Every structure is written in C-alpha cells, then in structure tokens.
Image (tube, rainbow, N blue to C red):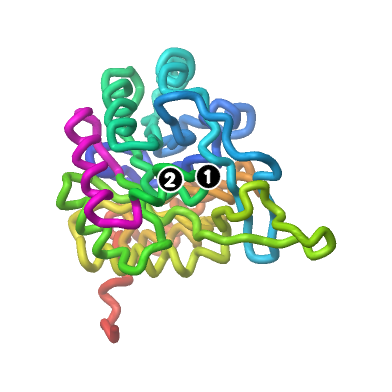
Amino acid sequence: MNMAVNLGGISMNNPVTTASGTFGFGLEYQPYVALQRLGAIIVKGTTLKPRLGNPPPRIAETPSGMLNAIGLQNPGVERVAEEIMPRLAALGVPVIVNIAGDTVEDYAQVARRLDSVPGVAGLEVNISCPNVKKGGIQFGSDPYTAAEVTRAVKASAGLPVIVKLSPNVTDLVTMAEAVAGAGADALSMINTLLGMAIDVDRRRPVLGNITGGLSGPAVRPVAVRAVWQVHRALPLLPILGMGGIMTARDALEFILAGATAVAVGTGNFVNPRATLDVVEGIEQYMIDHGFVDISELVGLAQRYPNKE
C-alpha cells in the first residue's frame, strides 16, 4: 500500500500534516506524538521580526468551534532558523514553515532567509490570517496583491511555495487562479472564518482582539466545498485541505473532494494524537476498501454525476 504523496514538490510519506498555529513548532508535541510518522510538520506563522501577538484572551470556545486571535506570536525568522530548525531537521520529517509579513518585502525577506536553512522543505505563505491588522487577510482578499506576494516569495526562494487561502472572500476560485498564475506550487485551504463571541454577562467581546478566526468541525463543510470547487477549476494544482478535521473520515472527505494532502488543526487541541489517528484511519480505510495507492482517492468524489 502506497500512502506517499507529492505536495507541489514536497515528498511526504503519507498525506497527513499539521495546520500552522495549532502544533507550535512541533517539538512541543514530541512527548505525545511520534513526529516521524507524520507526512510533514507545518510550524506556526513566522515573521521577519519577533511578534508578541494580540492581547488576551486570545482563545475562546463556542458551541460551534474555537475562536482564536493569537496574532502570529513568534520569535522571528532569525531564531527559527538558528535555534528551532536544527532540532526539527534532525527528525527527518519534511518541515514546512508558514510565513507572514506586514509588507510584500517582509514576505520576500523571510523567504530569502529560510531558503538555505537545512530541514526546510517548503514555505506556506499566509495571506489569510484574519487576526492581524497589517498583512494577512489584506493580501489574501485581493487577487492582484495575492499574486504580488506569491511572485515575491517565488523570486526569493527556490523552495516549493504553498499559498494559504482564506474563505473570507467572495470568489475563492478567482483567488486560487491568481496565485497559481503567479507561480504557486500548491494551495493550502482553508484558513479560519472570521467570527466573534460576546460575553453577555460582562456585555463585552470575549476576545481581546474583539474578532477572531473560527475553526473546528463547524467549518468543515465550508472547507470541503472550497476544496471541491478549486480542484474542479484547477485539477492539476495540488491542494492541502484543512478545516475541522478531527478523524480519518473527516480527512477522507477532503481527499475525495480533491485534496492531495490534509492538515489537522483544532483536532490537536482535543486529541494530541489526532494526526496519528488520521494516518492510521486512512490506512485502515484503504485496506477495508481495497485501495493500494492514496492517489486513487484524490478527487474520486468528483466523478459523481455533476449536478452543479
């Protein structure tokens, strides 16, 4: 049985990785998860300079998922390159660094710094974070600027570039086409949906940032729909699907819709072993249903008679 996939130039032993911002830099989960069993590790958002993040509270549970407004807290690219990557590189697992910036040049500089760092297998370009005032979603909501960031990163690094798209736009297919035209090697989708919660007893927003990104099972149907639509429009462009994946069956929805690989996000907070459970569950599904190569499943549901 072959579980290996190629995500835009990144070779993975299986299709399961972690969603940025939900797994720290990976090393935090080492006591609980055999990291070598993962197809790849996507580390938290990394910026040119260190960031303290947003004021607390930064996470809130709602009946329909988790709201977060971390604000890209991270130690900056220099510390990631010098102190964290050597430890990750020793694991022998592809590491994809999520990068963000306030300006197009920020993205380019971070990409340039990471280009020659051992162990970095690819870059996930975050143009869709809803929780920062500059950068993030402001680049991911306009096709022209999204393409501009993508071109700048591609010109600054020889690494595979995965562009992370937001569902908080009118036409996701247009955004996908724009970054694909600018050279994106793969897409990552979806980032969180913009939301908020209000404490009715205190009569004020729950989050210090007022709004945050909603994740968890509630967003999964939105994410599966997004993968379905973009895969149909751009069938040759690999997609890393994510959004509310808690189990292997959730992950299979994304793969059958057209995702080459999947990322577990909020599930890591509920079950630290969720990623491994998803790997093992996909393996068992393939055995039970007689599939010998994971590629047989990618986009298979698209063959269902189209009534759109």
**Figure quadrant of the C terminus:** bottom left
Q: At 29% across and 56% down in the image, what residue appears?
A: 142
Which amino acid is tagged 1?
A: Thr
Main SS of residues in magenta: helix
For the residues marked 2 and 1, what is the alpha-carbon distance in whole angstroms? Answer: 7 Å
Q: Is residue 91 visible?
A: no
- Quick check: 244 left or right of 169? right
Which amino acid is tagged 2?
A: Val
Mark 2, secondary structure of its residue: strand
154 or 205, which is in the foreground? 205
- Quick check: 295 left or right of 267? left
129 or 247, which is in the foreground? 129
Q: Which residues are magenta?
A: 140-162
Mark 2 vs 1: CB contact within 8 A: yes
Q: Quadrant of residue 80?
A: top left
Q: Residues within 10 Å of mark 1 (few under 14, many from 20)?
A: many
Q: Which residue is mark 1?
A: 275
Q: Earlier in the sequence, mark 2 or mark 1?
A: 2
Q: Is residue 64 visible?
A: yes
- Quick check: 193 left or right of 6? right
293 or 273, which is in the foreground? 273
Question: Residue 250's x, y, as percent?
Answer: 50, 61
237 or 11, which is in the foreground? 237
Q: At 32% across and 23% down in the image, what residue appears?
A: 114
Question: Residue 247's x, y, as percent?
Answer: 55, 56
Mark 1, secondary structure of its residue: helix
Number of numbered labels in the structure image = 2
Q: Is residue 145 magenta?
A: yes
Indicate which disc residue 16 carries: 2
Q: At 53% across and 43% down in the image, what residue appears?
A: 276
